[in-house]
Image: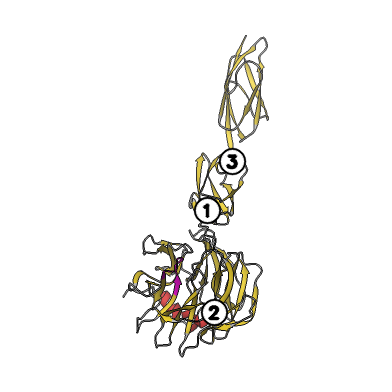
Amino acid sequence: MRTLPSILVAMLVLSVPLAVEGGPARAAFPGQNGKLAFVWAREIWVANVDGSNAIQLTASPGIDRSPRWSADGTKLSFASQRDGDLEIFVMNADGSGQRQLTFNAPAHDRTSAWTADGTQIVYDKEFSEIYAINADGSGGERKLAVGLLPGTSPYGDKVVFTGGSDVALVTMNLDGSARRQVTPGGMADFSANWSPGGTDLVFTRSSETDRDVYRVHANGVGLVRLTNTPNRVEVGPVWSPDGTKIAFLGCPGTLPGAGSSDCGIYVMNRDGSGETQVPTVLASFAEGPVDWQPLPPFPRAEPVTMTVSVVATGGTGIVTSVPEGLECPSVCSAEYDRGSTVRLEARPSGDAAFLGWSGACSGRSTSCAVIMDGEKRVGSSFGRSTLTLTVSVRGPGRVVSSPARIACAPRCTASFRRGTRVVLRALPAKGARLAGWGGACKGSKGCSVSMNADRLVRARFRR
């Protein structure tokens, strides 16, 4: 059997709490915020987000752990050791109808996640391989990848998991194809959870002594650290069904000892602000993190894509976005929640200048807001911030400029900031006259040049 890198195995066996901390992402359409599911005293409980109405759902002789809500909030999958080894079970939201789904003794099936349509469950076996099985148990299991802690996207077409030699987050299609590494790795990234819109991931990043919650766009852009509380380990983040909040477990202490006592359940805004602890309830770090029940209505609003292009003419720059997702020309396509507003920011590099937008944006302001009511395409152009004006003089005379950088005959050049308007004045010699302008100026009167490109002006004098 193929195995994961030794660094990951070492981290998973560092302590019991460490081995079972990671939970899968829960796939759910955007919906109303329901109950929290969690583990305490080796049994699965649910409670309101304010800590009230805590109800025990399981009472088995073994450990029950890692509860995960179905996308419609009517069922829970979980792992149970009631028959000696960990297997995947399912039950109704009220704890009734508990049914064993996998039968893989002596192997342990540990963590699970529902597909958005509720027809399949993805799970890991022995923290080393990822499988899928029909939710009714029919058809047998199907191996998808080498990895652990899988989770499904809210629209059922992708899986995120921990894998690879860098212990990074990886995404793939539900059939195991099109694998793509999301985070750079090297830090042990676990417990990735998709946002309800399918655009972002929250996850746990682990070191030898600490764990914190991070957020990143599903394409790997815009990594943000959300928690960093001293003497507390933060694990197992999950999105609220409405996408505005993130719940996680906060366990006192540092690794490897953190998690030996009960942990608090905390809720914060998606940017990490406004953290509060759910009162009156505790959870067990060692039996998996919390999960948040989605309730109807479930307005189906699949994410939409923005694609940005960068045209560089003598100068370069990048286009970034808020929310994160774009860093073009490196990453020029990203998905966003339908109906959301995405702010683009053009950032010229070095001595470059931003020339303007095209497509869904217009104008020359370096920022642009786009309402994502459908697929969007935006063009951006960058060029040199300084441009060259060349003046060529023939005959008895000379040319000067305002701003005063040109004063020459027969030929001279000067640099001007892009957008500068330069006024040229012809100074004929005694007894001579200006016969006419050529190039960027015409006629025989005044000459004014707008420096939005390199310019050449010719002046002819006659006696």
**Residue numbers of the magenta segment:** 112-120
Magenta span includes 115: yes
Is the residue 239 above or below the residue 259 in the image? Answer: above
Which tag, 3 or 1, sits closer to the chain's start?
1
Residue 93 rendering spot, x and y as whole percentages: 52, 77
Residue 292 rendering spot, x and y as whole percentages: 55, 72
Which tag, 2 or 3, sits closer to the chain's start?
2
Q: Quadrant of residue 99?
A: bottom left
Q: Nearer the viewer, residue 114 or 110?
A: 114
Asked if residue 419 can be seen in this view, the reply is yes
Residue type (three-letter) at the residue carrying disc 1? Leu
Residue type (three-letter) at the residue carrying disc 3? Ser
Which tag, 1 or 2, sits closer to the chain's start?
2
Instruction: Give me the C-alpha separation between circle 1 and circle 2.
Output: 35 Å
| Mark 1 lies on residue | 326
| Mark 3 lies on residue | 362
How are the colours assigned in the image?
secondary structure
The structure residue drawn at horizontal position 40% and vertical position 88%, both measured from the top left corner, is 83
Residue 453 rendering spot, x and y as whole percentages: 56, 32
Tell me the tag on residue 38: 2
| Element class at badge 1 | loop
Q: Nearer the viewer, residue 416 or 154?
A: 154
| Element class at badge 2 | strand
Instruction: Give me the C-alpha separation between circle 3 and circle 1.
Output: 18 Å
